[in-house]
């Protein structure tokens, strides 16, 4: 008999949700993570009372009532609304693209004038069926906005020309003929009070957690501990990169603690010209309205400049590169995962691959939680 029912590899959102549901069902669970912290990439650390999103800004948003009801069991969420600003060579524009953006760009006043301007520029470009991100963007917002507010930022983010990126990447970008500054079209939105680390702590409860443990370096020994392994690491790493590396974009952060109360007046400012090396600056205190947990004004501020880069082994993988080549390679790894499951099920054991890295999929936080809950149901938890 194994010591645990489940060994959960990775203490991020997928692992935490699975652990919570398994514990609720009376199962014995061990959680391990190679980092010295829980919460994966949603980890927040306290710096001078400011909850700093160490691995990049995370704003929870969802239209899924089941997910919202689940996650609010473990934290109270504030009313933060994501309203980023675009900085193009010192010109400031509203993101999402809305009537404030169109007025500043073209001087238009009415929604019809804005729609006519976009249609005019779309026709000038001769686009009927967008074949890539550039064409999709121009058909959505016209060439002027594409050139100033999308092209440079996107090429920095992905390290590829917009003409080489798939059109679907930009389709989720909100475009509104209203003055609505809320970036997300979401019924529920906010930041957990006290930060995401506290949220994940509450999900894990008193589960045994071992940090600083590399599963792949100790796989044989760790596998013996549980009947089922829930693996949320990179799927290609699990198989020793035997078919080659899946590609990711990574992010490097330059953090500064500043002895001033306000640096940019907003949580997120995107730098959309190609010449500025960073993609955006996050000012973390504004995720919680510049206050500490007791409602006191914070006298200092922390900013993070984000630099996008091509991933290489040893870097943190952030965004799967969802192009045709990587999609085909992932399907081969997925087949290997299915073969692995079949092989070890003959020994009365199981392995579950889940999460952004385990499924090589760009998930928003609510999608990770929804998928974890679905996997729990599939396993009668």
Image: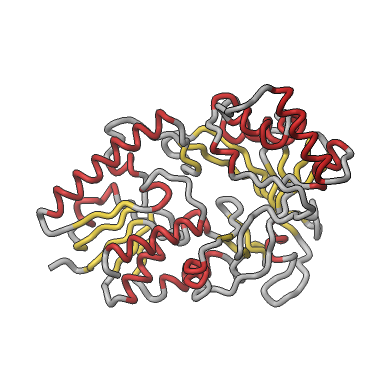
State how the image is colored: secondary structure
Q: Nearer the viewer, residue 166 or 20?
A: 166
**Is residue 78 at least partly visible in the picture?**
yes
Q: Which residue occupies 26% across, 64% down?
A: 379
Q: Which residue occupies 35% across, 32% down?
A: 328
Q: Where, by quadrant of the figure, is residue 239 drawn? A: top left
x, y percent for residue 295: 73, 75
Q: Which residue occupies 43% across, 54% down?
A: 35
Q: Where, by quadrant of the figure, is residue 345 drawn? A: bottom left
Image quarter in which the C terminus is found: bottom left
Q: Nearer the viewer, residue 5 or 360?
A: 360
**Left/right of residue 253 with respect to residue 265 in the rendered view:** left
Q: Which residue occupies 28% across, 62% down?
A: 7
Indicate whether 116 appears above or below 54: above
x, y percent for residue 189: 62, 63
**Left/right of residue 254 with respect to residue 86 in the rendered view:** left
**Left/right of residue 186 with respect to residue 266 in the rendered view:** left
Indicate whether 166 appears above or below 375: above
Image quarter in which the N terminus is found: bottom left
x, y percent for residue 154: 63, 34
**Is residue 263 at least partly visible in the picture?**
no
x, y percent for residue 13: 45, 60
Seen as rendered, the residue at the extreme left is: 346
User: How many numbered marks, from 0 up?
Assistant: 0
């Amino acid at each position: 008999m194994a010591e645990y029912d489940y060994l959960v590899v990775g203490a991020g959102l997928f692992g935490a949700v699975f652990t919570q549901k398994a514990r609720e069902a009376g199962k014995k669970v061990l959680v391990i993570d190679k980092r010295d912290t829980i919460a994966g990439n949603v980890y927040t650390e306290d710096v001078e009372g400011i909850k700093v999103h160490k691995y990049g800004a995370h704003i929870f948003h969802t239209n899924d009532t089941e997910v919202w009801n689940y996650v609010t069991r473990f934290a109270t969420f504030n009313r933060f609304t994501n309203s980023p600003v675009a900085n193009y060579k010192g010109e400031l524009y509203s993101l999402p693209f809305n009537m404030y953006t169109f007025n500043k760009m073209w001087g238009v006043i009415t929604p019809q004038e804005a729609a006519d301007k976009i249609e005019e520029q779309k026709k000038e470009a001769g686009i009927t069926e967008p074949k890539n991100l550039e064409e999709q963007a121009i058909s959505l917002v016209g060439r002027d906005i594409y050139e100033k507010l999308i092209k440079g930022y996107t090429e920095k983010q992905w390290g590829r020309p917009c003409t080489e990126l798939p059109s679907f990447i930009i389709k989720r970008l909100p475009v509104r003929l209203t003055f609505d500054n809320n970036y997300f079209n979401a019924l529920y939105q906010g930041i957990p009070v006290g930060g995401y680390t506290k949220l994940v702590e509450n999900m894990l409860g008193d589960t045994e957690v071992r940090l600083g443990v590399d599963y792949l370096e100790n796989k044989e020994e760790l596998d013996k501990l549980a009947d089922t392994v829930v693996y949320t690491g990179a799927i290609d790493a699990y198989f020793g990169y035997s078919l080659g590396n899946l590609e990711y974009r990574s992010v490097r952060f330059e953090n500064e603690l500043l002895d001033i109360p306000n640096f940019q007046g907003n949580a997120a400012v995107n730098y959309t010209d190609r010449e500025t090396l960073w993609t955006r600056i996050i000012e973390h205190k504004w995720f919680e309205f510049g206050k500490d947990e007791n409602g006191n004004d914070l006298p200092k501020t922390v900013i993070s400049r984000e630099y996008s880069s091509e991933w290489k082994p040893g870097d943190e993988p952030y965004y799967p590169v969802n192009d045709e080549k990587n999609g085909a390679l992932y399907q081969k790894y997925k087949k290997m995962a299915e073969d692995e499951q079949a092989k070890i099920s003959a020994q009365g054991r199981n392995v579950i691959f889940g999460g952004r890295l385990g499924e090589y999929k760009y998930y928003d936080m609510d999608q990770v939680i929804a998928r974890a809950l679905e996997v729990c149901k599939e396993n009668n938890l």
